[in-house]
Amino acid sequence: MEMEILTKGYEPKDVENKWYQYWEENNLFFAEAPSEKRPYCIVIPPPNVTGTLHMGHALNNTLQDILCRFRRMKGDNVLWQPGTDHAGIATQNVVEKDLASKGMDRYAVGREKFVELVWEWREKYGGLIINQLKRLGCSCDWSRERFTMDEGLSRAVREVFVRLYEEGLIYRGDYIINWCPRCHTALADLEVEHEETESSLYYIRYPLEKGEGHLVVATTRPETLLGDTAVAVNPEDERYKHLSGANVILPVLNKPIPVVFDRYVDVAFGTGALKITPAHDANDFEIGNTHQLQRIKVIDEDGRMNELAGPYQGLDRFDCREKILNDLDQTGLLEKIEPFRNAVGHCYRCKTVIEPLLSKQWFVKVGSLAEAASRSVKDGKTRIYPANWEGVYFEWMNNIRDWCVSRQIWWGHRIPAWYCTQCGEVHVAKEPPQHCRTCQDPGLVQETDVLDTWFSSALWPFSTLGWPDSTNELKTFYPTSVLVTGFDILFFWVARMMMMGIHFMGDVPFKDVYIHALVRDVEGKKMSKSKGNVIDPLEVMDEFGTDAFRFTLAALAAQGRDVKLSEERILGYRHFVNKIWNAARLVFMNLDLEGNERAGERIYTLPDRWVLTRLGQVSEEVTRALEEYRFNDAAGLCYQFVWHEFCDWYLEMAKQGLYGNDKAVKESLRDIVQEVLMAALKLLHPFMPFVTEEIWHRLPATEGSIMVAKFPEPSDFMGDEDALREMDLLMGVVTGIRNIRGEMNIPPSKKVNIVIDVADEDVAVVLRQNMAHIQTLAKVEQVSIASGVPKPEASATAVFGQIQVHILLKGLLDFEEEMKRLGKEIKKIEKDMELSQRKLSNEEFLTRAPAEIVEEVREKVRIFSLKLGKLTQNLRFFEEIDD
RNA sequence: GGGCGGAUAGCUCAGUGGGAGAGCAUCGGCCUUACAAGCCGAGGGUCGCAGGUUCAAAUCCUGUUCCGCCUACCA
């Protein structure tokens, strides 16, 4: 291996590709099945084949990769199951757009050819997002990559459909569905986006058939009037009780329709009279059923008025609205128009206004499935993090309606149902039947509808593992360990996986669900192309490197809060990556890279004992944070330790020995410094796989990939409480001196002499042993340590615990300044002191507060008064000189 | 309409009952042989507002304002 010294700055581009290739070539992402090791499995939320990597993917997959790499280093048998989703409508739209650019549409090419084109498109572009995931460093087991429409998964889909049908949980029927006139398909309720819209409420007069007068109804969609088959009023409504059995005349079409009574009608809304269009409104449909009303469909699948719309036939629904309003106005039947805000449904894919339409569709009866899915979370079989999402989950499960699973598009799993052309008998089967089972006729045609994309996604946690076959993968990894996903697909996906998993596997699909936030821009807005505020993860990786990017995402991923991403923040973490790189450089410059020297017995100095003890503590804290999905805490702990403890204190102190003349100390240090660096790299690896691997490979004491190194744990290190205490003293003294130097603007080039006044002999010993560190770190020339020495003239004093450090500043000390500084410090402590004393003089505090809290305050008062005494003493010293 | 989340330093955010923290930005001093993408130091906040509970509240409760999101069959 090359042993050159590292370049001055870290260059991510040079190393990222190299190491990803290395990991793949060495099969380091491969999961064993079966295996003796503890299993850990995550199924990836399959990205759309049409997609390219956006910030949401980047966050989602970074978090999964952190968990997978962490668990692997913990010794688990990790399977990160990858794959892609065929994304029915989305993908079909993309290919249709492509066709449109060539002046064609899907009807021109025909179904078979069109599906072929989509497959071709998928061959060509489907790998794009996979490569982008690799770029991000994702350690998926690519040998197990799946696609929702591959042979195995399609078999699982048919199996599930047929079984549900046979169990009576899938049925076909006439219902009002959400129809997208642009995509030409039904949509599930979830796929409709409601948007608050400024619209109008139109008051229309329906003349009474007998006698004078009219009934006024209020509606937002006057064009549906053409399909009205009744007007409903509330039976309790005094205004309309006399209309029992009456008819009104439907305007425009001039035909009588009945007045019906239904409790659904809200007396307080509009006029309390509701026009009923059973074929174009979900509620009206229900009311229509109750009263056995005719269903008249007046709007067709293109959103145009059909032949039943009389004079309006052929008009677009919105043009029809204008015309009908105009006509009503002409005949004096339009009473008034009020401005009105309501939520209008739009297609989640193409944003076209949804038309509720009567249609024959396939449904999954979800009641019992949802109940079981709900219970599993209540029983704690699946835990949702953060827990507040549980409420949202229950809420949805409790109010769930049957799931419309048929779609009138061409790209997807074609529903395995066949109709007899002779007798119409319906056959649902895994394989095409040869002939009709009732009339024996061989003329069977398959259902043209395909399944909702989420139908196959719902099977993902077990279909990818080989179901319906009983595979080793399934036995080893189901139920999976955790599902990591954004809350935007909690209902679309998570809820349905729960239902299907429990029903078909008899167990929940995952033990944990971790729900992360959405990535937004700096202002907290959702990133979208139309707003022009998208940050492209690929560009970020180009500019800052993947490790910095990943670390940023992890550091910002606090539970329950959105991730507001800014380039500044990423830049900050690039600096951190560079810091690590340079720390490694320092270590390298002092290593015997040829490996000729054998280190003898280790000599542990205070900084060594301290840093190793801290490593143990930090390892434990990082582990706990990751186990609890507190990614930001884990990242923060690494950052703080590596930069401010390892680099700022430990390495600075290690230089003493590394640059010194004592050969035994030097060799020991080389060993320890390398050990500490290795441990730090291991802690960082889940977050920053590339830079850690690069440095790891260059260290003489390492072997193989850092991916398979053991994650640090407390038992790897000494736990030396004394070292922590002693380092506190040492750092306190150094900080005290630096503090004064800083405030007095004494440049580092100007060395000072100090006198340390310390009563405790043990403390004196520690400081004496580490005198050299004080000298280097605080730029001190001479140190003298004694007990009860008088304050030297022309000195500034730092007080720390029971220690006083007098800094001799002959010719440098500005008396006024020092007096001001002391005065400021005294004032601050007096304030703290007063607060504490007030507490202690409060009888209730003394009797009611826990004893240890009271003792804590007493201890504070003791420390404060000690320090205050010393500070005042020093101030008086100057005042006397002043006199 | 229902629900959820947020409001803490100039900015982005941690902090869930015992003396307010970090990063960035700002100011001052340093090219100290790993790193100026750096080092050392400093300043900066009645924790949205009003009540309440408590010996003690950024933290718990109630109300309120503003912002964001989810959800819904008042046409």
Image (cartoon, rainbow, N blue to C red):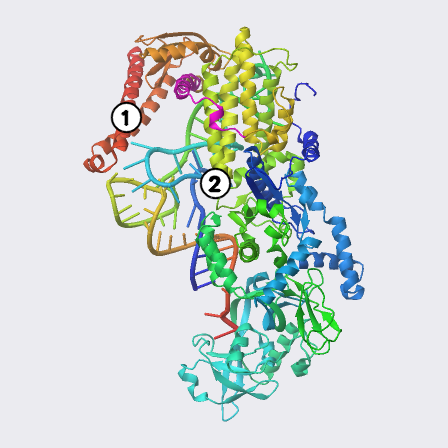
Asked if marks 2 and 1 touch (Cβ < 8 Å), the reply is: no
The range drawn in magenta is A711-739
Q: Chain of mark 1?
A: A
In this picture, residue A837 sits left or right of residue A35: left
Q: Is residue A810 magenta?
A: no
Question: Residue A158: percent from the left, percent from the top?
Answer: 66, 60
Badge 1 marks a residue whose secondary structure is helix
- Spot the residue most to the left: A843
Pick the residue in front: A624 or A275: A624
| Label 2: how many Cα within 10 Å (few below 14, some 14–19, many 20+) | some
Picture quadrant where residue A760 is located? top left
Question: Residue A154: percent from the left, percent from the top?
Answer: 68, 57
* Amino acid type shown at disc 2: Glu
| Label 1: how many Cα within 10 Å (few below 14, some 14–19, many 20+) | few
Picture quadrant where residue A491 is located? bottom right
Badge 2 marks a residue whose secondary structure is loop
Alpha-carbon distance for marks 2 and 1? 35 Å
Question: Residue A197: percent from the left, percent from the top?
Answer: 55, 64
The image shows residue A507, relative to residue A366, as above or below, that is above
Residue A565 seen from this side: no
- The residue beneath circle 2 is A628
- The residue beneath circle 1 is A859
Q: Earlier in the sequence, mark 2 or mark 1?
A: 2
Between disc 2 and disc 1, the foreground one is 2
